[in-house]
Image (spheres, rainbow, N blue to C red):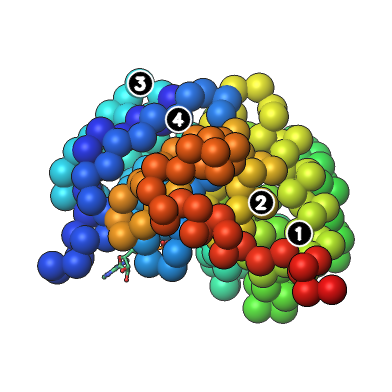
Amino acid sequence: MISLQAVSKRYGTAIALAPTSIACEAGSTTALIGPSGCGKSTLLRIIAGLVVPDSGTVTLAGETLTARNSEKLRRRLGYVIQDGGLFPHLNCRDNVTLLARYLKQAPAAINQRVAELAALVQIPAAALARFPRELSGGQRQRIGLMRALMNDPPIVLLDEPLGALDPITRSELQTQLKTIFAGLGRTVILVTHDMGEAAYLASSIALMRDGRIVQRGSLQTLLEAPAEAYVSEFIRAQRSPLPSL
Ligand SMILES: Nc1ncnc2c1ncn2[C@@H]1O[C@H](COP(=O)(O)OP(=O)(O)OP(=O)(O)O)[C@@H](O)[C@H]1O
């Protein structure tokens, strides 16, 4: 469903992404994890058609991404960025329904979908009438999620979608997201800094460093057969509060 062949990106002389190949099957959830600046968002933005790679090809559902078809392909994917990426001049409902209205979907169907999604991400109806600046960071992220899921896209890309949430809301939304991801045939790639979240939400984890994927597999594979010492180091560095007791 999503396939990258030797895709790379430099900014000046700095390598944001070394030639990278990765394939994600339809219906799978893959987590990209790694330290700040290792190229996770660059990889996601390339798949979303928002960054043009220097080399390589991106194929989405059998179609190779080009400058010509990127806008059409982008409509088939939901993309959530760290702070929600909402338009500041539109209220939250208008942010969520922008594409649906542009595509002239029936108002009743739009209203029903908004209500379903608001319940799913636990956003009160009153908050939908507010502008993004009038919400907390976590609420903005949830509106961003609603917008990405509004048209039920077959591909969902999430760049740290739960980063600004408190642990209880985060855990509740992780449970909801797992249900959403289990929906038939939806292919998901999410970026996270949290190995627990990656292992809970994704069947496959791609651990990155310095613009390359060091290892891809389940948490168990990463633990039991680390490709490099760095893999074990990265997993060990995820601190659990319990040993402090
Ligand atoms: N538009 C840009 N111009 C110049 N350099 C960039 C640009 N975007 C990203 N980079 C650089 O490319 C590298 C990879 O950045 P990227 O945003 O993909 O990292 P990341 O792994 O998502 O980091 P974080 O976890 O902090 O969000 C970094 O060194 C970053 O500074």
Place of residue 45 in the rendered image (x, y in percent of width and height, measured from the top left): 38, 52
Tags 2 and 1 in contact by the CB under 8 Å rule? yes
Mark 3 lies on residue: 62
The tag earlier along the polypeptide, 4 or 2, is 4
Residue drawn at the location 49% of the way across and 59% of the way down: 233
Residue drawn at the location 46% of the way across and 43% of the way down: 226
* Label 2 Cα crowd, 10 Å radius (few <14 / some 14-19 / many 20+): some
Count of numbered marks: 4
How far separated are the C-alphas under marks 3 and 4?
Answer: 12 Å
Furthest residue toward left? 13
Mark 4 lies on residue: 24
Residue drawn at the location 77% of the way across and 68% of the way down: 243
For discs 2 and 1, the disc positioned in front in the rendered view = 2
Mark 1 lies on residue: 170
Place of residue 174 in the rendered image (x, y in percent of width and height, measured from the top left): 74, 49
Say the numbered circle drawn on residue 197: 2
Tags 4 and 1 in contact by the CB under 8 Å rule? no
At label 4, the amino acid type is Cys
